[in-house]
């Protein structure tokens, strides 16, 4: 059986907060420790998701889609380089 390394986390809370947490854990049918861990994990994922996700209004979504679907034509220098690279790959 694989052992999982655990780490300890402590937090100072007011008596009212602890009472709230204990009650919520009981209602959820969980231990206080499991309730707090689950709540922290949920909040951490939400915080990171909110940070990582870009929300655009409809107008900006349409602009983004337009530019993704209709990119500008590459400059001639780039097209020449791409063609040269294709020939190099075919000769190899």
Image (cartoon, rainbow, N blue to C red):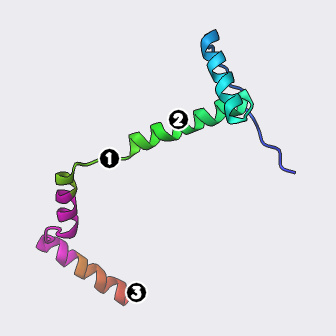
Q: Nearer the viewer, residue 45 or 76?
A: 45
The structure residue drawn at horizontal position 75% and vertical position 35%, both measured from the top left corner, is 6
Q: Say which of 48 and 46 sits in front.
A: 46
- Which of the 4 image quarters holds residue 28? top right
For label 2, the SS is helix
Percent from the top left, x then y, of residue 46?
Answer: 48, 40
Residue 43 shows which numbered tag? 2
Q: How many marks?
A: 3
Tag 3 residue: 92
Q: Which mark is residue 54?
A: 1
Instruction: Check disc 2: other Cα within 10 Å, few if <14, some if 14-19, many if 20+.
Output: few
- Residue 52 placement, left or right of 66: right
Label located before the other in sequence (3 or 2): 2
**Is residue 77 covered in magenta?**
yes
Q: CA distance from mark 2 to mark 1?
A: 18 Å
The stretch in magenta equals 62-81
Other residues around mark 1 within 10 Å, as few (<14) / some (14–19) / many (≥20) = few
């Amino acid at each position: 059986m694989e052992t999982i390394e655990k780490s300890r986390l402590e937090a100072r809370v007011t008596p009212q907060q602890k009472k709230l947490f204990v009650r919520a854990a009981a209602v959820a049918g969980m231990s206080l420790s499991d309730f707090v861990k689950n709540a922290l994990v949920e909040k951490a994922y939400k915080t990171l998701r909110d940070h990582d996700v870009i929300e655009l209004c409809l107008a900006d979504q349409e602009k983004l889609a337009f530019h993704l679907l209709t990119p500008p034509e590459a400059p001639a220098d780039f097209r020449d380089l791409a063609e040269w690279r294709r020939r190099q790959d075919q000769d190899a």
